[in-house]
């Protein structure tokens, strides 16, 4: 008896599924609400934004000037590429760079390639980057450079460096950097 009912029930179920696929019926449209657009909404100003607190050294212009000059000096040394002395910059940055960063830079020094054979700095612009940690400053140093490839073709580019300067043993040192374009 059970086997006799199973076959017709399966056929009826299959027929309903096929009919539903070909004749879906009316689609419900999403309900429209009369809410104002986000740009038209007024926001409550009950949530207070905490005031920005500068570090003590941020208020001293001599600290900002010293760390800015250090970041610029660092970029002036690492951005150019001299094919005759490709690792000379390592000697000149040693006094201003943290020992850990210096070790990383000596293991993989920048060298000339076919596309970047020689590079010289034309100009530098420096901007502060907000950093909330005490005794650490960050600078965005943009180097405007002229790059020559191995064939002698030149182009002018911008190289962006984000340079971290921190106080180590009472002296400001470069502790890290990132390069972008």
Image (cartoon, rainbow, N blue to C red):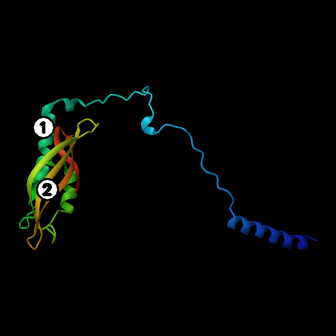
Sequence-earlier tag: 1 or 2:
1
Q: Residue at x 23, y 36 (%)?
A: 135
Please say if the residues under marks 1 and 2 sit with CB atoms less than 8 Å apart: no
Q: Is residue 38 left or right of residue 171?
A: right
Q: Between residue 143 and residue 133, name the one nearer to us.
A: 143
Residue 63 on image: x %, y %: 15, 35
Residue closest to the eye, 72 or 124: 124
Quarter holding residue 86 = bottom left
Residue 36 at x, y = what percent? Answer: 49, 37
Tell me what residue is drawn at x 13 percent, y 50 percent.
74
Whether residue 177 appears in this view of the structure is: yes
> What is the C-alpha distance between the residues marked 1 and 2?
20 Å
Location of residue 93 in the rendering, given as x and y in whole percent from the top left corner:
12, 52
- The local secondary structure at tag 2 comes to helix
Vertical side of 155 occupied by 42: above or below: above
Q: Which residue is mark 2?
A: 78
Residue, far top: 46
Q: In the drawing, what numbered circle is on residue 65?
A: 1
Q: How packed is label 2: few (under 14 Cα within 10 Å), some, or many (20 or more)?
A: some
Q: Quadrant of the C terminus?
A: bottom left
**SS class, disc 1:** helix
**Disc 1 packing (10 Å; few <14; some 14–19; many ≥20):** few
Is the residue 117 above or below the residue 62 in the image? below
**Placement of 15 over or under 137, stated as above or below:** below
Whether residue 95 is visible to the viewer of this picture, yes or no, is no
Residue 133: image quadrant is: top left
Locate the N terminus and report the quarter of the image it occupies: bottom right
- Residue 139: x and y in percent read 20, 44
Residue drawn at the location 29% of the way across and 29% of the way down: 53
Q: Nearer the viewer, residue 127 or 170?
A: 127
Mark seen at residue 23: none
For this view, does 26 lie left or right of residue 138?
A: right
């Amino acid at each position: 008896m059970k086997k006799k009912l199973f076959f017709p029930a399966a056929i009826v179920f299959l027929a309903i599924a096929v009919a539903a696929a070909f004749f879906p019926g009316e689609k419900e449209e999403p309900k429209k609400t009369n809410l104002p657009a986000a740009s038209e909404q007024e926001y409550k100003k009950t949530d207070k934004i905490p005031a920005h607190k500068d570090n003590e050294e941020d208020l001293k212009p001599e600290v900002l000037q010293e760390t800015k000059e250090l970041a610029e000096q660092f970029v002036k040394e690492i951005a150019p590429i001299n094919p005759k002395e490709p690792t000379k910059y390592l000697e000149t940055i040693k006094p201003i760079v943290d020992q850990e960063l210096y070790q990383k830079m000596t293991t993989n020094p920048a060298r000339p390639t076919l596309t970047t054979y020689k590079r010289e700095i034309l100009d530098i612009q420096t901007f502060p980057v907000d950093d909330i940690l005490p005794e650490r400053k960050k600078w965005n140093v943009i180097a405007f450079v002229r790059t020559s490839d191995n064939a002698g073709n030149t182009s002018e580019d911008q190289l962006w460096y984000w340079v971290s300067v921190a106080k180590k043993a009472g002296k400001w040192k470069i502790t890290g950097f990132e390069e972008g374009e």
